[in-house]
Amino acid sequence: MVPTYLPGDRLLVRRHGRLPRAGDVVVCTDDVDGGAAPITIHRVVSVVDRDHLMVVGDNPSLGSTSRHERQVTRSQVLGRVVARVSSAERPPRRDYR
């Protein structure tokens, strides 16, 4: 999610509350093969149905792959980012919605 969030940024994530909607930034787990799943950050592009979201990354330096839309299930969404708590490189940013 560079440039929106940088490595080392500490984020406040709301695990419960309203369902994510277009424009929200969410923290997801990439459930693959039942192993240890990496945690990723994506922006919600659209809500497909009650169980699926279309998401995209914000990092243009990774080329087109980070800008490809992909579908995630609600069970993969760990929570919605509501604020950057701290960063070594810039002041806090609050994304309250």
Image: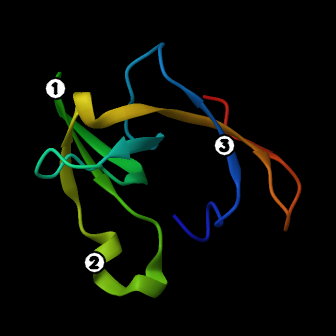
Q: Residue at x 33, y 71 (%)?
A: 67
Which of pointers 1 and 3 lies earlier in the amino acid sequence?
A: 3
Q: Earlier in the sequence, mark 3 or mark 2?
A: 3
> Tags 1 and 3 in contact by the CB under 8 Å rule?
no
Q: Residue 21 location in percent, x, y?
A: 38, 32
Res. 51 mark = 1
The total number of labels drawn is 3
The amino acid type of the residue labelled 1 equals Asp
Q: Nearer the viewer, residue 47 or 7?
A: 7
Q: Residue at x 49, y 33 (%)?
A: 80
Q: Report helix, strand or loop for mark 2.
A: helix
Please, what secondary structure does the residue beneath circle 1 have?
Answer: loop
The disc at residue 35 is: none
View extreme (top): residue: 17
Disc 3 marks a residue whose amino acid type is Leu
Which residue bears the numbered disc 2?
65
- CA gap, disc 3 to disc 2? 24 Å
Q: Position of residue 13 (x, y in %)?
A: 58, 32
**Residue at the image position 27 percent from the left and 78 percent from the top:** 65
Crowding near the residue tagged with mark 2, few <14, some 14–19, many ≥20 C-alpha atoms within 10 Å: few
* Of labels 1 and 3, the one closer to you: 3
Please give the residue where the numbered disc 3 appears in the rendered image. 11
